[in-house]
Amino acid sequence: MKDVSFQLYSARNFPPLGDVLKTAGSLGYTQVEGYGALYAALDDTALAALKSDMDAAGVTMPSAHFGLDLLESDPERAIAIAKTLGIRAIYCPYLMPDQRPTDAAGWRAFGERLQKAGEPFRKAGLDFGWHNHDFEFIALADGSVPQDHIFAGGPDLSWEADIAWIIRGGADPFAWIEKYGKRITAVHVKDIAAAGENKDQDGWADVGHGTVDWKKLFEALSKTSAKYYVVEHDNPKDYKATAERSIASIKTY
């Protein structure tokens, strides 16, 4: 694995962003991944300044998260942001609990909704897909799983597979990698602390310092279409330590 990315959401509580970008670059990250609140409200001048800061830090932003509201309401703006920042892959990252379907038909319809939302981005030459959490792997009343229905409704959707969330959803990541490996174009690389540990960090751990078998996972993922490997920690107490320890672990795999 040549290039490792850092999800900037991990450092959202540690401004300023310019310093975060410099830190990522200095630690050996060549890429960062953006998230909606980071740039959705920026004007063209501010976006250009962000790109300049990225260039100065020696990092690119090939992948990014955009909220479904912007993707559906103003795809032209999202495409313009992607063009300015050099984004090549866009992933819709979340669905609020009160918006989640409760049955198979509803989740398939949601997949169809994502399929439609992705049309302008695919036409613009961008990869477009879904980023999972845990709720997509929790069985419905009929025993089926939302993630299958999302992909059934969205045949052209790529997948940014968040492995740790798959595990937290009670599923086997290796089985899902085997099943949908051709759809996986990005991977979130994060770790889960041992039971009872890191409660102040929502139970997450730095990569290589938790319970997830990343050595075997990287072997399985090497057979997929994954292009981007993105280090993430949802609530680190020290993002610099997390970024440093995680990339050091990855280099040993």
Image (cartoon, grey):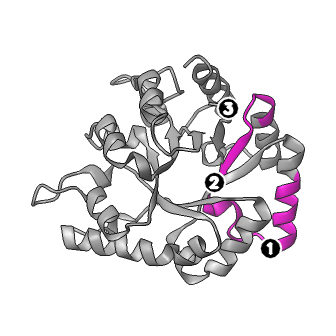
- Alpha carbon distance from label 1 to label 3: 33 Å
Q: Is residue 244 above or below residue 107?
A: above
Q: Which residue is mark 2?
A: 63
Q: Is residue 250 above or below residue 152?
A: above
Q: Quadrant of residue 114?
A: bottom left
Residue positioned 41% across, 37% down in the render = 164
Neighbour tally class for label 1: few under 14, some 14-19, many 20 plus, Cα within 10 Å = few
Q: From the viewer's perspective, is the residue at label 1 or at label 2 nearer?
A: 2
Q: Quadrant of residue 34?
A: bottom right
Residue range (magenta): 25-52
Q: Horizontal and vertical percent for residue 94?
A: 45, 61
On the picture, is 30 further left or further right than 138? right
Residue 209 magenta: no
Residue lying farthest to the bottom in this orientation: 73
Say what secondary structure mark 3 lies in: loop
Q: Earlier in the sequence, mark 1 or mark 2?
A: 1
Residue 44 magenta: yes
Residue positioned 65% across, 40% down in the render = 6
Q: Which residue is mark 1?
A: 43
Q: From the viewer's perspective, is the residue at label 1 or at label 3 nearer?
A: 3
Q: Horizontal and vertical percent for residue 168?
A: 33, 39
On the picture, is 159 further left or further right than 151? right
Is residue 245 in view from this perspective? yes
